[in-house]
């Protein structure tokens, strides 16, 4: 079934009143053009996050595009708001052109690149000419060129290349074009032969759609780069085999736990790669059937809104339909993903995160499994959902077997004292040691691991029309009180994690009686029939 491209607009336009509500619209306000309502309206923060200025692109698109139901088209106040937002981005920057995101003096590459791309794209769309703004663009571009980000986030570097190229188009500074090409080469070096691009420790399908989008936009602006086209073809093929049967994508099995999906890159590439046509059609189906994930908090939702409008503008109705193989089995060893599409069941399982998985029967999600959580008498928890670089697993004789350790789970929460100390550090030493502070935060919130003596073996036995899952826990500890198998649990901090998906409506499974066996014998087996 063909789904109309107008679905993109329906989604995007429903958000525009909220975008305008977030904006300080008063021309006599000190914060005119600021989209961070927590800062300018509620005054609950002592700084404004520069990421929010990304909203200028959404307003520029609705101002510039004439389509049915668009009451914002050619409205002069909308154009004023775009200019105000770009000017606030300039005012809200540090002397080196950077901006903050989560705390003062962060000098965040992500927020700097996202907002620079949005501001420059809006500037190009509305054909603005302003020397002061162009000077600001060049200063931020220079910051992006010099910034060394801790951790590998391919999507940030792909976006940086796109933003730098936009500044080149505006200023005609050929040095910026060269730096953009250097960034592209850096991004391509982060691609696995399996097609995905690295996000921290490995493959995150959700963020992969962002990287594809940024590279496709870059290719659209600079079609001479043949290497990008080849890399994108491999990335699209990976998505083609891993997108869920209901059009949703990603989840807890990725390196960053995200359920992102931005469609515009696939719309751009659909003319070249038939597999991209299938992917975009699947996402349109998810819009029609309300199965897409939702991350609608103020910080995140705009990533999607302007992308939907761009996808509408790039959509081609005259492309032949593409189908996925009816049955296949793929093991992406580097990504740590095992995909099995057989007997009407679609399984996608992470071998690197302890065998967590999602299982679909035709187009319906029937199981979302985020690993095992064991609770002790003192309230502490241990979890099996931890990233392993070299997990023990095997695939043979219609079985997948994964062996992992349980790890200690810690949940870091703020307190008035912690916040006071953190503010003193960021305000006093932040700009000089911004990278060190970020590394420490990543260590605490994202990549820290502490193994235990408790082990898990997960055995998937594939039988016609069903899967038998056998979990065997072994331990020398004897103080457990609860065993959970959660449906929507994530163990690390990711800003864009914990999205709304249909899995959050599924109950966690509770195996409390089995804890008595585990404590007594040091071993327990839990068997489930999945079909």
Image (spheres, rainbow, N blue to C red):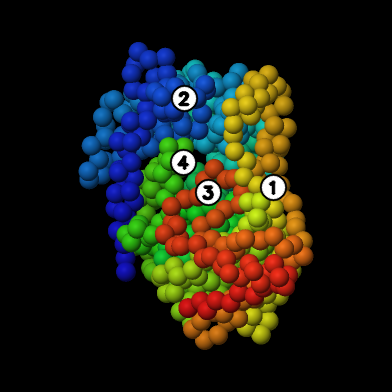
Of 98 and 477, which appears nearest the observer?
477
Occupied quadrant, residue 400: bottom right
Evaluate whether residue 309 shows in this view: yes
Q: Secondary structure at mark 2?
A: loop
**Marks 4 and 1, Cα distance to the nearest angstrom?**
22 Å
**How dense is the environment of label 3, judged by Cα within 10 Å: few (below 14), some, or many (20 and up)?**
some
- The tag on residue 497 is 3
The reply to whether dot 4 and dot 1 touch (C-beta < 8 Å) is: no
Q: According to the image, label 4 marks what residue? A: 300
Q: Position of residue 198 (x, y in %)?
A: 65, 52
In percent of the image, x 69 and y 53: which residue is there? 408
**How dense is the environment of label 1, judged by Cα within 10 Å: few (below 14), some, or many (20 and up)?**
some
231 on left or right of 22: right
491 on left or right of 308: right
**Marks 3 and 1, Cα distance to the nearest angstrom?**
15 Å
**How dense is the environment of label 4, judged by Cα within 10 Å: few (below 14), some, or many (20 and up)?**
some
Q: According to the image, label 2 marks what residue? A: 44
Q: Secondary structure at mark 3?
A: loop
**Marks 3 and 2, Cα distance to the nearest angstrom?**
23 Å
Query: Which of pointers 4 and 3 lies earlier in the amino acid sequence?
Result: 4
Query: Which of pointers 4 and 2 lies earlier in the amino acid sequence?
Result: 2
Query: Which of pointers 3 and 1 lies earlier in the amino acid sequence?
Result: 1
Closest to the camera, between mark 3 and mark 2, is 2
Of 320 and 531, which appears nearest the observer?
531
Q: Secondary structure at mark 1?
A: helix
**How dense is the environment of label 2, judged by Cα within 10 Å: few (below 14), some, or many (20 and up)?**
few
Query: Which of pointers 4 and 1 lies earlier in the amino acid sequence?
Result: 4
Q: According to the image, label 1 marks what residue? A: 447
Query: Which of pointers 1 and 2 lies earlier in the amino acid sequence?
Result: 2
**Marks 4 and 2, Cα distance to the nearest angstrom?**
18 Å
Q: Secondary structure at mark 4?
A: loop
Evaluate whether residue 191 shows in this view: no
């Amino acid at each position: 079934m063909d789904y109309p491209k107008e679905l993109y607009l329906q989604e995007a336009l429903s958000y525009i009143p909220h975008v305008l509500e977030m904006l300080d619209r008063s021309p006599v306000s000190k914060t005119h053009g600021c989209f961070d309502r927590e800062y300018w309206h509620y005054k609950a923060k002592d700084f404004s996050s520069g990421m929010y200025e990304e909203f200028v692109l959404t307003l520029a698109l609705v101002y510039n595009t004439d389509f049915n139901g668009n009451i914002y088209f050619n409205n002069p106040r909308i154009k004023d708001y775009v200019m105000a937002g770009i000017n606030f981005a300039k005012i809200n920057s540090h002397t080196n052109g950077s901006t903050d995101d989560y705390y003062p003096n962060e000098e965040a590459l992500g927020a700097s690149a996202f907002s620079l791309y949005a501001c420059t794209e809006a500037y190009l769309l509305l054909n603005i000419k302003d020397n002061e703004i162009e000077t600001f663009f060049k200063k931020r571009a220079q910051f992006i060129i010099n910034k060394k980000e801790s951790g590998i986030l391919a999507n940030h570097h792909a976006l940086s290349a796109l933003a730098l190229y936009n500044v080149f188009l505006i200023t005609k500074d050929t040095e910026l074009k060269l730096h953009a090409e250097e960034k592209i080469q850096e991004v391509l070096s982060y691609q696995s032969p399996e097609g995905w691009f690295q996000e921290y420790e490995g493959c995150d399908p959700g963020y992969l759609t962002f990287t594809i989008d940024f590279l496709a936009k870059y290719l659209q602006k600079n079609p001479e780069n043949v290497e990008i086209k080849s890399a994108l073809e491999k990335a699209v093929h990976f998505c083609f085999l891993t997108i869920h049967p209901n059009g949703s994508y990603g989840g807890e099995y990725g390196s960053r736990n995200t359920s992102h999906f931005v469609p515009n890159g696939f719309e751009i590439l659909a003319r070249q790669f038939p597999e991209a046509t299938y992917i975009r059609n699947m996402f349109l189906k998810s819009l029609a059937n309300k199965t897409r994930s939702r991350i609608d908090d103020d910080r995140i939702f705009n990533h999607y809104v302007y992308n939907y409008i761009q996808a509408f503008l790039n959509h081609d109705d005259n492309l032949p339909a593409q189908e996925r193989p009816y049955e296949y089995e793929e093991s992406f060893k580097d990504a740590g993903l095992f995909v099995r599409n057989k007997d009407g069941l679609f399984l996608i399982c992470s071998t690197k995160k302890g065998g967590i998985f999602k299982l679909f029967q035709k187009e319906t999600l029937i199981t979302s499994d985020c690993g095992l959580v064991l609770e002790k008498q003192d309230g502490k928890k241990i979890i099996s959902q931890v990233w392993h670089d070299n997990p023990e697993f095997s695939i043979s004789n219609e079985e997948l077997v994964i062996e992992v350790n349980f790890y200690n789970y810690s949940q870091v929460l703020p307190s008035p004292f912690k916040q006071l100390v953190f503010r003193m550090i960021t305000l006093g030493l932040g700009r000089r040691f911004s990278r060190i502070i970020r590394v420490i935060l990543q260590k605490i919130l994202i990549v820290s691991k502490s193994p235990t003596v408790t082990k898990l073996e997960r055995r998937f036995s594939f039988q016609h029309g069903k899967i038998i899952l056998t979990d065997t826990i072994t331990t020398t500890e004897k103080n457990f009180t609860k065993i959970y198998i959660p449906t929507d649990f994530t163990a690390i901090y990711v800003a864009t994690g914990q999205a709304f998906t249909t899995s959050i409506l599924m109950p966690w499974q509770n195996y409390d009686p089995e804890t008595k066996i585990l404590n007594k014998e040091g071993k327990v087996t839990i068997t489930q029939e999945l079909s």
